[in-house]
Image (cartoon, grey):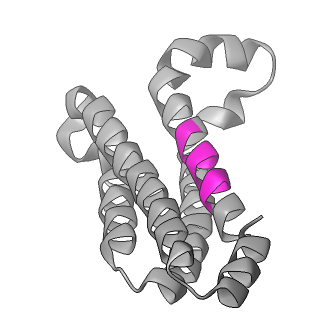
Amino acid sequence: MQKSLDKTGIWVTTICALHCLFLPVLLPVLALVGFSFVGAPLFERVILAVSLLIGAIAMVTGFRHHRQVAPILLLALGGVLYWYKDIFGHVGEPILILAGAGLIVLGHVKNVRLTRACACHLPASDSQSVSAVSK
């Protein structure tokens, strides 16, 4: 389950980043077909909040196995950068989006690797139960 949460977190974060980066180009077309709500700031905040919630659940689950705080810190820092992407205006926004999304994805990847490495060091019976849970 933890591995699938990390995969879901990576996908949601990537989709969120692509949405933010390509929205200025697609917004006129979306308005023509009735999907202008996709450009609303509230929509962006909700998607980011869902991404961070999935990330938090995955990181806490992983932390219980590997006891490393680095993935949680990467998620938090990436979330802060992403949340405040507007702080440097339109010029800095794409940079903060990419940096924030990159840190969130890196946190998920690190979480998966640490959990996998931790499962390898458990006794055979514990390792099998952890691998069964991660599938």
Residue 118's place in the image compared with 12, above or below, is below
The residue positioned 53% from the left and 29% from the top of the image is: 18
Q: Which quadrant is the N terminus positioned in?
A: bottom right
Image x and y of residue 107, in percent: 41, 59
Image x and y of residue 23, in percent: 54, 24
Residue 23's place in the image compared with 73, above or below, is above
Q: Is residue 7 magenta?
A: yes
The residue positioned 59% from the left and 33% from the top of the image is: 39
The residue closer to the viewer here, 33 or 91, is 91
- Residue 88: name its quadrant: top left
Image check: 2 left or right of 72? Answer: right
Image check: 61 left or right of 80? Answer: right
Q: Which quadrant is the C terminus positioned in?
A: bottom right
The stretch in magenta equals 6-14
Residue 4's place in the image compared with 40, above or below, is below
The residue positioned 52% from the left and 62% from the top of the image is: 112
Is residue 21 visible in this depiction of the protein? yes
Is residue 46 visible in this depiction of the protein? no
Q: Is residue 29 magenta?
A: no
The residue closer to the viewer here, 9 or 118, is 118
Image x and y of residue 34, in percent: 80, 23
The residue positioned 30% from the left and 54% from the top of the image is: 81
